[in-house]
């Protein structure tokens, strides 16, 4: 019958359809799947089909519809692939890439992070605070009342017109802030920038970095301080590093000490870094003076503690063989580039 032939011809047309572009795909969709598609019109001719073949005809038209749907999806993905291929064909994989500028961590930052990681292992957490300080937190609370001669040791930058506000001369100010707001036990490390009105030279600068440590609890002793510093020295400078403790004076600690480590370069043989003494000074420390605890409302008859302050730049310079402290703040990329591959 003629309508059967028409439907069969449509099926063949679907099966053999090929398209070149999106336009042709859309034509295919409109013809076979659109709202006024050819299958609807052929199906309306079912009235000319004798009753006993109506079912067969319905099935045939349905088969054409399904084939059209399948073919549409197939053509669509083939077209997408073709478009992608065309895009890749435009890609020139031999072209040199655009190189990106990758930053590097500053050597001072590298060393401070290494120190923090070491003290973290024994329970110290990091506390940071302001660089512009008041007189109380930088001096008075630390047992350095006005007119105390030791204030002269720290050439202070005063904020103009306001002698009570200073650029902090040490990170010990963070000790005071933490003790004021936190009850013992306290076990903190405060890395940060400090400022002193010193003549800039190859060996000293008007700003540099310190890492301050503080441990306050019941029954903290000088032996605990030594254990902690020995642990740090062995981790940072190497397992066989020895420490040497010399008596010293700081207003905020009693007793106070300065600590040397056996030279990590020559191991005591004598070299330029240790100036042929075999020892390198790395920090100041001591047992927190009871006055300082009381200033921060901590009962000194119950609690005791130790503190230490490490100067970072000197250690950075020794570690990386840097001769002039000024190179650390000049931001010369040729210098900073050296530290790109340093992974601590
Ligand atoms: N604040 C001292 C300085 O800047 C370093 C220091 C010494 C810190 C002894 C301390 C300490 O906590 O106990 O020179």
Image (spheres, helix red, strand yellow):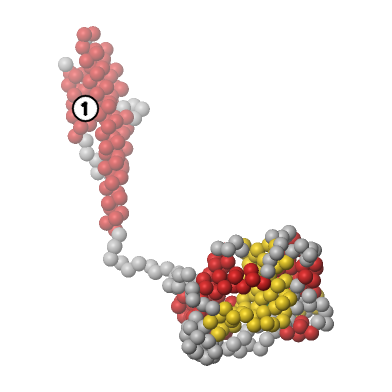
* Residue 338 position within the rendered picture, expressed as x and y whole percent measured from the top left: 45, 78
Residue, x 26% and y 12% (percent of image)?
Answer: 47
Quadrant of the rendered structure where residue 146 is? bottom right
Crowd band around label 1 with a 10 angstrom C-alpha radius: few (<14), some (14–19), many (20+)? many
User: Residue 141 or 241: which is nearer the viewer?
Assistant: 241
User: Residue 279 or 43: which is nearer the viewer?
Assistant: 279
Q: Is residue 319 above or below residue 288?
A: below
Residue, x 72% and y 79% (percent of image)?
Answer: 250
42 sits to left or right of 170 = left
* Residue 148 position within the rendered picture, expressed as x and y whole percent measured from the top left: 81, 82
Residue, x 27% and y 56% (percent of image)?
Answer: 89
Instruction: Let me know if residue 61 appears in the view.
Output: yes
| Quarter of the rendering occupied by the N terminus | top left
* Residue 123 position within the rendered picture, expressed as x and y whole percent measured from the top left: 60, 61
Q: Which residue does the numbered mark 1 point to in the structure image? A: 10
Q: Is residue 43 above or below residue 206?
A: above
Disc 1, ligand 1: is the CB inside 8 Å? Answer: no
Quadrant of the rendered structure where residue 112 is? bottom right
Residue, x 65% and y 75% (percent of image)?
Answer: 309
Determine whether the residue tagged by mark 1 lies in a helix, strand or loop.
helix
Instruction: Let me know if residue 332 appears in the view.
Output: no
User: Residue 200 or 21: which is nearer the viewer?
Assistant: 200
Tag count in the figure?
A: 1
* Residue 9 position within the rendered picture, expressed as x and y whole percent measured from the top left: 18, 26
């Amino acid at each position: 019958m003629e309508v059967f032939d028409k439907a069969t011809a449509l099926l063949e047309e679907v099966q053999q359809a090929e398209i070149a572009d999106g336009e042709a795909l859309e034509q295919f969709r409109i013809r076979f799947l659109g709202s006024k598609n050819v299958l609807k019109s052929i199906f309306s001719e079912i009235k000319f089909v004798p009753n006993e073949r109506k079912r067969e005809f319905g099935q045939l038209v349905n088969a054409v519809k399904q084939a059209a749907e399948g073919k549409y999806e197939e053509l669509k993905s083939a077209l997408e692939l073709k478009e992608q291929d065309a895009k890749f064909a435009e890609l020139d994989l031999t072209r040199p890439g655009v190189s990106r500028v990758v930053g590097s961590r500053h050597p001072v930052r590298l060393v401070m992070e290494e120190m923090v990681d070491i003290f973290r292992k024994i329970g110290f957490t990091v506390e940071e605070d302001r660089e512009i300080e008041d007189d109380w937190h930088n001096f008075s609370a630390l047992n350095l009342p006005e007119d105390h001669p030791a204030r002269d040791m720290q050439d202070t930058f005063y904020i103009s017109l306001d002698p009570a506000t200073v650029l902090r001369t040490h990170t010990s100010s963070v000790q005071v802030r933490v003790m004021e707001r936190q009850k013992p036990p306290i076990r903190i490390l405060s890395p940060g920038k400090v400022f002193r009105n010193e003549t800039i030279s190859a060996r000293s600068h008007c700003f540099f970095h310190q890492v301050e440590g503080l441990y306050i609890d019941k029954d903290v002793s000088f032996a605990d301080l030594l254990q902690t510093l020995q642990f740090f020295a062995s981790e940072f400078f190497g397992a066989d590093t020895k420490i040497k403790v010399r008596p010293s004076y700081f207003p905020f600690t009693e007793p106070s000490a300065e600590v040397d480590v056996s030279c990590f370069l020559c191991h005591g043989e004598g070299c330029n870094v240790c100036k042929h003494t075999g020892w390198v000074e790395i920090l100041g420390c001591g047992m927190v003076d009871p006055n300082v605890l009381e200033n921060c409302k901590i009962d000194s008859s119950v609690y005791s503690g130790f503190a230490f302050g490490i100067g970072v730049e000197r250690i950075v310079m020794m570690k990386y063989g840097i001769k002039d402290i000024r190179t650390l703040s000049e931001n010369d990329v040729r210098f900073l580039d050296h530290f790109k591959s340093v992974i601590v």
